Image (spheres, rainbow, N blue to C red):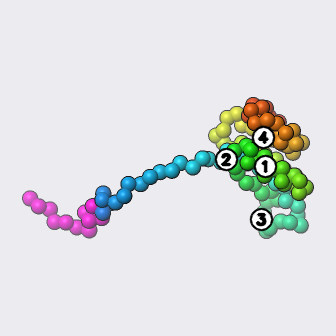
Amino acid sequence: MNRPSNCCDKHHDQHRQGPTAIVIRKIPNIWYVSICVPHQEKTGYYYSRHSRTFASESEAKQFAAVKIAAGAEVTAGTLNPVVPKRIVCPSEIEKWLSEEPAKSATGACKRV
């Protein structure tokens, strides 16, 4: 027995014949750098800190170095679910910037 076609059948047939989707996995951002924004430079946001995320520690270090050179107070760290968690407090930023990548992956100002 033939079943009458309806709009749903046509819709499903179009998807079956379409191109195959390709999924490209983006490298997740695993480091953050947070910058203290002085009150006269606030952009209308409630918070006085702004953060950016980075895919690698070296990218985070480059950004932090530029902000420190401009006179900003900077903190940095790893985002969840990176283990061990690393938080680099403002008093340890200069030390973190001078660490070699292999050493900085194991050392920390504070581990949570």
In the rendered structure, which disc, 1 or 3, sits on the residue that comes first in sequence? 3
* Secondary structure at numbered mark 1: helix
Distance Cα–Cα, label 1 vs label 3: 25 Å
* Secondary structure at numbered mark 4: strand
The residue labelled by disc 2 is 55
Give me the disc on residue 87: 4
Give me the disc on residue 62: 1
Work out which quarter of the rendered image holds the C terminus and state it: top right
Residue shown at the point (25%, 63%) measured from the top left: 9
**How many residues crowd around disc 3 within 10 Å: few (fewer than 14), some, or many (20 or more)?**
few
* Secondary structure at numbered mark 2: loop
In the rendered structure, which disc, 3 or 4, sits on the residue that comes first in sequence? 3
In the rendered structure, which disc, 3 or 2, sits on the residue that comes first in sequence? 3
Distance Cα–Cα, label 3 vs label 4: 24 Å
Distance Cα–Cα, label 1 vs label 4: 17 Å
Residue stretch in magenta:
1-13
Three-letter code for the amino acid on which mark 2 is drawn? Ala
Distance Cα–Cα, label 4 vs label 2: 16 Å
Residue shown at the point (30%, 57%) measured from the top left: 16
The residue labelled by disc 3 is 45
Three-letter code for the amino acid on which mark 4 is drawn? Ile
Visible residue check, residue 12: no
Work out which quarter of the rendered image holds the N terminus and state it: bottom left
Residue shown at the point (70%, 33%) measured from the top left: 84
